[in-house]
Structure formats: structure tokens, C-alpha cells
Amino acid sequence: MERDRHGHEASGGNMRRVLIALVLTGLFMIVEVIGGIVSGSLALLADAGHMLTDTMALALAAAAFHVSKRPAGGNLTYGYQRFQILAAFVNGLSLLVVVGWILFEAVERFLAPRDVLGATMLSVAAAGLVVNLVSFVVLHTGDRENLNIRGAALHVAGDLLGSVAAIVAAIVIIYTGWTPIDPILSVVVAALILRSAWALVKRSAHVLLEGAPEWLDVPDMQRRIVAAVPGVNEIHHVHVWGLTPQQLMLTMHVAISGDIGSQSGVVRKVKQFLEREYGIGHTTVEIEIDGCADDRAGNC
């Protein structure tokens, strides 16, 4: 119960952070669209387009935190925790779409340069930098291992980079009149966003595909259990996955000696070892004495 209470408190804090960022991002997006149209800046319009997807992404992240609080039941026996990972995956994909749009617009600007009002661009970009800094700090103080928070923070970080690029481009245009700097810096920002977006999509997809945690060496874990728990001869048929990166689950077959005193005692010690050493709290351990029950299915 203590762990559940702290988990709900952390989830509530994360949701508040996302809502604050959502309000700031949504309001300033309108300002940036107007500023981009008036100034003719692709960097501002690209950032405004990014902020539009951010607004939707942050709304999705907030909804994910709300939905994940629903209790398990019916056909969803694990509850709705995985919805956070689904939201992170969708947010990562939306970032990839934004990158594609920025690159497309940048090519058009290279082929047909447009006049840019540097002073207007600089004012809007500077205001955007302040808003994005506040949003990023709010999200960065949340749970960094939560993929939903990471997805939201990456969106805002992309906006932050966009604001910096727009400020630099505006200063160059004001003092030199060289407008190609606008699409050039937009491409630089797109490349930075692409790297983070791909990492988010890759990690969230790994969780959705029920892959084992990247840091976990399963063969080494099996050897350690055999060495640490008396009576355990062999471990096989191991599956490790997570509802989220923080909520790991495991199933395994444990072969024990026929003369072992208490099978439940062995199970208890294996479970305690897994939780203590690996933080895996939800485990299903099948005890075997006379061979693997799944041997005919080829699963052992």
C-alpha cells in the first residue's frame, strides 16, 4: 500500500507538470503563428507547427496519466498503465511528422527565398524562449524514467531549440540581411528533434513489444539465482517485460532437487531475490521436479 500511495503521488505530480506545460504551450502557439505570418519567418512557423503538435501531445500525455489511474478489471487485468507507453509512442511518431514538415518547408525556402522581418521575428522568438524554458523546467523536474514525461519533455525541448534557432536567425537577418539562415537553422533544429524522437519511438516500441529491459542480462540473472537460492538446480523458460519501464514483470521455470523441504520456501526466496536485486515485484515462478511440463510444446 505504501508503494501504491507513492506511485499515485508521483503520477499526480507528473500530471500537474504536464497540464502546466500544456497551458503555456497552447497559449504561446497562437502568438507564434501570428508572429510567423507577420514576419514571414519559417523558423517561427516551424516552431509554431511543432508547438501545435506539442499541444496535442501534452494533452495526450495528460490523458494518459488520467487513464492509467483506472483500476484493473474485466478484460484489462493489468489495468491501464500501458496507455502511458502508447502515448509516448504516438508522441514520438508525431515528432517525426514535424521533422518531415520542417524539412519540406526548408527546401521550398531555399528554392524560393522570402523576405523576413527580423525585428518581429526576434521579439516573438525571445518571448517563446522564456515560455519554453519555463515549460521545460517544469517537466524536467518530473519522473525522468517515465516515458510519458520524457515524450512531453522532448516536445518542449524541441520548441526550446526552435526558439533559440529563431533568435539566432533573427539576429543574423537584422545585421546582415542574409535570409537563408532561417531555413538553414530550421534544418539544424529538425535534425536535433529527429535524433530524440527516434530514441523515444524505439524505446516505447520496445516496451510495447514486451521486450526485456535493456540493462538486464537474463543469463547472468539465472546464474545468480541458482547460486543464491539453495535447492535450485536450473532456471529456464524465462520471460521478462514491463507494463512500463518502472513496472517490470517476470515468469520463469525453476527446477529444484526432489528432496527439497519446502517448495513454497524456494519460491519465496526466488521472489525476494528478484525484487531485492532487480526491482522486479510481479513474478510468477513455476516449480519443476520431474522435468519441464512444457517440454512437448518445445518451450523449455
Image (tube, helix red, strand yellow):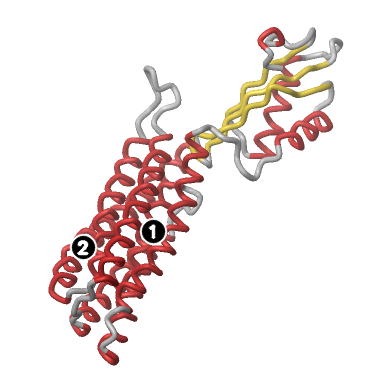
Kind of residue sitting beneath label 2: Met
| Residue displayed at 46% across by 57% down | 196
Query: Could you say which is closer to the camera, residue 110 or residue 217?
Result: 110
- Badge 2 marks a residue whose secondary structure is helix
- Badge 1 marks a residue whose secondary structure is helix
Q: Is residue 13 above or below residue 50?
A: above
Query: Could you say which is closer to the camera, residue 204 or residue 127?
Result: 204
Locate residue 175, reporting x and y percent: 28, 92
Q: CA distance from mark 2 to mark 1?
A: 18 Å
Q: Quadrant of residue 104?
A: bottom left
Q: Residue furthest front?
A: 111
49 displayed left or right of 15 = left
Q: Are marks 2 and 1 in contact (CB under 8 Å)?
A: no
Q: Which residue is mark 1?
A: 139
Question: Badge 2, how many Cα within 10 Å: few under 14, some, many 20+?
Answer: many
Query: Could you say which is closer to the camera, residue 216 or residue 122?
Result: 122
| Residue displayed at 75% across by 15% down | 263
| Residue displayed at 18% across by 74% down | 40
- Discs 2/1, front: 2
80 displayed left or right of 289 = left
Locate residue 79, reporting x and y percent: 41, 28
Locate residue 217, reporting x and y percent: 71, 40
Dot 2 or dot 1, earlier in sequence: 2
Q: Which residue is mark 2?
A: 29
Q: Is residue 233 above or below residue 106?
A: above
